[in-house]
Image: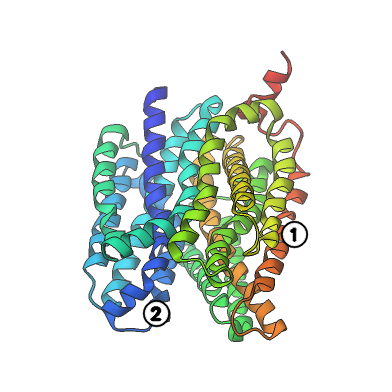
Amino acid sequence: MENRKIKYTALLVALTFFMENLDATIIVTALPAMAATFRVATVDLNIGISAYLLAVAVFIPIGGWLADRFGARVIFISAIVLFTVASILCALSNDLTYFTVARIVQGIGGALMVPVGRLVVIRATPKKELVQAIAYITWPGLIAPIIAPAVGGFMVTHFAWQWIFYINVPLGLFAIYAGLKLIENTKDTEIGRFDWIGFLMLATACAMVMYGIERVGQDIADAATYLIICALGVVLFILAARYMTRIPQPLLKFDAFQHKTFASSIIGGSIFRISISAVPFLLPLMFQVAFGLSALHAGLLILTVFVGNIVMKPFTARIMRRFGFRKILMVNGVIGAITIASGALFTPETPWIWMVILLFVSGLSRSLQFTCYSSLSFVDILPKDKRYATTQFSLFFQISLGMGVALAALILRGLMHIQGHDQPELVDFHWTYLIIAAFSLLSLFDTLKLKKDAGDVVSGYQQNASH
């Protein structure tokens, strides 16, 4: 695949990634309006968020197998069609049951779109071009949760809640057209039979973990129960992995974990993603509850992080060539933790300019670390393992984003309980930021295990240093 085509394909996958991540978070601002339409309590609509995230987590593992069996283009386009049609059904919903079913279908489409698209790009991209391709793909994963509150608030305020789903229709139609032009229908003629037992074990494990994660932050009184469900899901996941290592044609192979670069991107990368995904949940809540800002003003302030993401993008590859993966992940990991902890300095009296500067720096740091971990994932992966590695990366990516919101909510509610607060107060938010920042530093222990030349063939650091 020629370089220009690789670039356009990566941008196409980025678009679908944006659609999937936006729909996971944009619904939050529309919940009150939707509750009025469905004649239910706002809290009841949490099932619309949970159903979507569960469906995504459950069906991610089968994307790679389906792409190899029926062709990458067929599955990718079918997933976009499914996601787009389901978006229309969500908008047309007039009761909670109909809406929940539509969200599940939408989640299935989202689960297949991104992993299959990422697999196409990873397989076609030479190692020297991998950083740029990964940057295109992963960038929307950063910006969607940040702009979702502002976009959702604008749609609900000036149009109607249905438009948060109708917006996917033109995006989906464009993605279908581009997919037909750009993606070849490559297949694996030697692919084995579908591993139903492995899929059912893995799907159940993912569903238990995601359900527990979603519920633990919403119901602090029964947090122990949901944490047990999460733990049982982890145990079942381990059993599923052990089962799949013992059969000749498993749904997933775990050989990629033998490479420290991939293992670090999953373990250390998940800790990082959990930490940064907590921030878009905490900031708007603090600005509205503790500062008294409107939802729109809070959303606009958080867009500063988005600006930081944009500004960093053109410099990412050059920074990697200058310093290499290991040094960046170490130093920027500390910077990222400091920017998270800086949330503990925010008060209603804090000058806006200082908050804007800190949020902007946070955006810079998030973008660089995000791209580094995503690029490092595939630097040492053999061609035979790319399908499995892509699926596993997507799976852990999705779970870690859900865990970030749940962890933040659990810490915040726990602090409220300890201090006897019925509603979150500023001091509760401040301590939550500090705890999340300390948690993010745990990723550095995994980074320390990386070799100094880890990923140099992709970043260009070693070659650059020799001149």
Picture quarter containing residue 195? bottom left
Q: Is residue 6 visible?
A: yes
The percent coordinates of residue 368 (x first, y second) are 61, 40
Residue sitting at the far top: 467
Q: State the residue at coordinates (42%, 69%).
A: 49
The percent coordinates of residue 231 (x first, y second) are 63, 73
Q: Is residue 243 visible?
A: no
- Is 334 drawn above or below residue 181 in the view shown? below
- Is 121 drawn above or below residue 252 in the view shown? above
The percent coordinates of residue 317 (x first, y second) are 58, 29
Which residue position holds label 2? 42
Image quarter (top left, top right, bottom left or bottom right) of the C terminus: top right
> Dot 2 lies on which element?
helix
Give the residue type that dot 2 points to: Thr
Picture quarter containing residue 83? bottom left
Q: Nearer the viewer, residue 279 or 94?
A: 279
Left/right of residue 149 with respect to residue 314 in the rendered view: left
Badge 2 crowding class, 10 Å Cα cut-off, few under 14, some 14 to 19, many 20 or more, is some
Give the residue type that dot 1 points to: Ala
Badge 1 crowding class, 10 Å Cα cut-off, few under 14, some 14 to 19, many 20 or more, is some
Distance (Cα) linking label 2 and label 1: 33 Å
The percent coordinates of residue 54 (x first, y second) are 44, 67
> Dot 1 lies on which element?
helix
Q: Nearer the viewer, residue 23 or 387?
A: 23
Which residue position holds label 1? 438
**Number of callouts:** 2
Q: What is the number of the mark on residue 408?
A: none
Image color mode: rainbow
